[in-house]
């Protein structure tokens, strides 16, 4: 049940939402570390001159993100740890563009906070213009998704993790594109992209904004202005589904896919700020056209000495080299394993975009399972274009996590449009029983009729061949999210679900957890 503290926080948040004036601002999405705030923002109309952000008595000039001046980013560095900063957005003449608001920096790595609360979910994208002739949709309407997000935010999380698939506008994937970006409805709404031209500064920019804006702006708006956000990208964020046949292999992304994903991140949501324990030269990091030192694909949520969450996507740099193939580059794998082996932090948690523990027969999974006659997953026939090196890397990462004998080897992932929880005791020949890996699917925010694995793939997510598991919560194809509460001794996971077929939309506003799992640190 919701605590009295949470009820009070909900009431305060509701009052603030009603009285806060967004002015000319369309969306605000900040991220933080212990000494820096990075903010992405957009406005109702282009600004002719750079706006400014005021924080802690200093002014930080805005940097234009698009070519028209509607999207801007602000990088406030040199801040103090664990301090709430009142932020003011000002136009070039010093006039307020919206009411001020507060963002708090994280504790310093040496600090010892007693609690951390995170809101975690996946698959929040979706475009209201895309519907089937029979009325079915892949996505919940944006207004319903926003209501789910509001319920999650009502628990006053210290940060939010949105794990992948913020945009669905597939262009080439043989199955998915004909229902999304390449569908008659998609082409009529946004037009066709010219892959020979840049995304921004060409006619592609208008198509890009029409495809992406309605999926992100109505959902987030300014409701997350005081909640640091961490956005991971997955396959659809590159404007395609992970599919492979003799005509098309969609990943790793081609140049145009990469530019689409980079443009989405550049305009709408912040990159990952630097962390002293994450190498600044990891792939996709420290690019010249980004704020100093940020990473686009591999991030860290470090909250004092209480928790370090390792966020990593597996699409941009995956390889197709058979036994030596990887989902993340070797240098990234080394970083992940080094952080698992290091001391000084109570909890080290893995947040990959692609989930260990389950398969839905997709090509771009850790596992070789595919849908077989009879509607079950199996490996009696090879999965075309699947790479055995992916599974080998999976095994190495799970083994490294299990080796954290004083920590919970927890993985919270995205992609599979489900709520689920299990313990993994063995992967292949590797015995994990001394400290079983805990795998969690936190729930999809935006999936509807045709987006569930059972609808699109003909099978629900299930444990793959070669894993020995205990399913505490078998995959549930319902919308939802997870609240994770960290203390020095434990992690409490509260799972929330909403059944769009059986519950009214109004039920979202009072959702309570249907499952609570408390994970205790070993020893």
Image: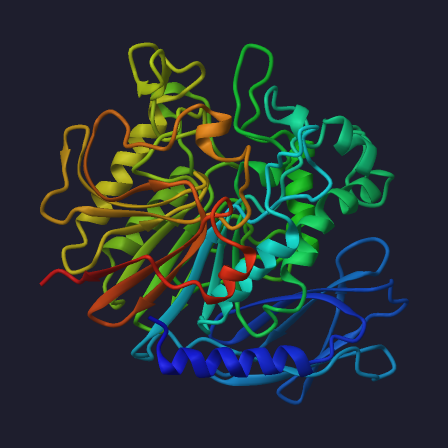
Residue in the picture at 63% in, 61% down: 220
In this picture, residue 4 sits left or right of residue 207: left
Seen at 61% across and 69% down, the residue is 223
Q: Residue furthest bottom?
A: 57
In which quarter of the view is residue 295 placed? bottom right
Residues 466 and 272: in front is 466
- The one nearer the camera, 255 or 131, is 131
Residue 41 drawn above or below residue 386 = below
Q: Residue at x 59, y 17 (%)?
A: 248
Q: Is residue 467 left or right of residue 84?
A: left
**Residue 494 image position (x, y, % from top left):** 33, 61
| Placement of 151 over or under 136, stated as above or below | below
Q: Position of residue 136 (x, y in %)?
A: 62, 34
Quadrant (top left, top right, bottom left, bottom right) of the C terminus? bottom left
Q: Please, is residue 354 above or below residue 320 in the view? A: below
Please state which of residues 373 and 80 is positioned toward the viewer in this rendering: 373
User: Is residue 288 something one can see in this rendering?
Assistant: no
Q: Residue at x 23, y 64 (%)?
A: 343
Indicate left or right for 87 with 274 as reference: right
Q: Is residue 31 above or below residue 459?
A: below
Q: Which colour scheme appears in the figure? A: rainbow
Q: Nearer the viewer, residue 247 or 181?
A: 181
Quadrant (top left, top right, bottom left, bottom right) of the N terminus? bottom left
Q: Is residue 409 among the parts visible in the rendering? A: yes
Q: Is residue 79 left or right of residue 365?
A: right
How many dots with numbers? 0
Image x and y of residue 398, in percent: 25, 42
Q: Position of residue 416 (x, y in %)?
A: 43, 38
Question: Furthest-right residue in view?
Answer: 48
């Amino acid at each position: 049940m919701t605590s009295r503290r949470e009820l009070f926080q909900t009431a305060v948040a509701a009052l603030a939402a009603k009285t806060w004036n967004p002015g000319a601002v369309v969306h605000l999405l900040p991220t933080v570390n212990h000494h820096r705030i990075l903010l992405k923002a957009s406005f109702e109309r282009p600004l002719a001159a750079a706006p400014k952000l005021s924080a802690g008595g200093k002014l930080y000039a805005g940097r234009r993100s698009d070519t028209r001046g509607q999207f801007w980013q602000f990088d406030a560095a040199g801040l103090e740890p664990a301090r709430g900063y009142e932020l003011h957005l000002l136009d070039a003449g010093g006039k307020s563009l919206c009411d001020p608001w507060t963002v708090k920096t994280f504790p310093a790595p040496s600090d010892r906070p007693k609690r951390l609360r995170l809101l975690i979910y996946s698959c929040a994208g979706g475009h209201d213009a895309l519907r089937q002739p029979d009325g079915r949709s892949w996505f919940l309407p944006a207004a319903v998704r926003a209501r789910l997000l509001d319920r999650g935010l009502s628990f006053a999380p210290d940060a939010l993790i949105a794990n992948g698939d913020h945009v669905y506008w597939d262009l080439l994937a043989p199955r998915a594109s004909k229902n999304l970006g390449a569908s008659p409805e998609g082409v009529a709404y946004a037009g066709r992209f010219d892959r020979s031209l840049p995304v921004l500064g060409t006619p592609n920019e208008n198509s890009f904004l029409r495809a992406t804006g309605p999926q992100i702006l109505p959902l987030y708006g300014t409701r997350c202005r005081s909640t640091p956000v961490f956005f991971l990208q997955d396959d659809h964020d590159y404007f395609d589904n992970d599919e492979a046949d003799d005509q098309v292999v969609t990943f790793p992304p081609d140049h145009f896919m990469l530019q689409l994903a980079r443009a989405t991140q550049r305009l709408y949501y912040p990159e990952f700020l630097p962390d002293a324990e994450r190498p600044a030269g990891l792939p996709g990091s420290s690019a010249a056209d980004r704020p100093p030192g940020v990473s686009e694909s591999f991030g860290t949520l470090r909250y004092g000495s209480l928790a370090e969450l390792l966020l990593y996507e597996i699409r941009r740099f995956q390889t197709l080299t058979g036994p030596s193939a990887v989902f993340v580059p070797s240098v990234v794998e080394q970083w992940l394993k080094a952080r698992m082996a290091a001391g000084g932090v109570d909890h080290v948690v893995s947040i990959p975009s692609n989930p260990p523990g389950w398969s839905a027969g997709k090509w771009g999974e850790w596992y070789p399972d595919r849908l077989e006659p009879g509607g079950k997953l199996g490996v009696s026939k090879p999965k075309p274009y699947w790479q055995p090196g992916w599974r080998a890397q999976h095994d190495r990462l799970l083994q490294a996590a299990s080796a954290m004998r004083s920590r919970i080897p927890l993985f919270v992932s995205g992609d599979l449009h489900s709520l689920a929880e299990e313990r993994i005791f063995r992967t292949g020949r590797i015995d994990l029983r001394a400290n079983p890996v805990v795998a969690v699917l936190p729930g999809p925010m935006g999936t509807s009729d045709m987006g569930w694995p059972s609808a699109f793939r003909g099978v629900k997510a299930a444990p793959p061949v070669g894993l020995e598991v205990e399913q505490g919560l078998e995959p549930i194809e319902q919308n939802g999210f997870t609240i994770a509460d960290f203390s020095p001794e434990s992690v409490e996971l509260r799972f929330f679900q909403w059944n769009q077929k059986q519950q009214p939309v109004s039920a979202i506003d009072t959702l309570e957890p249907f499952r609570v799992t408390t994970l205790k640190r070993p020893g």
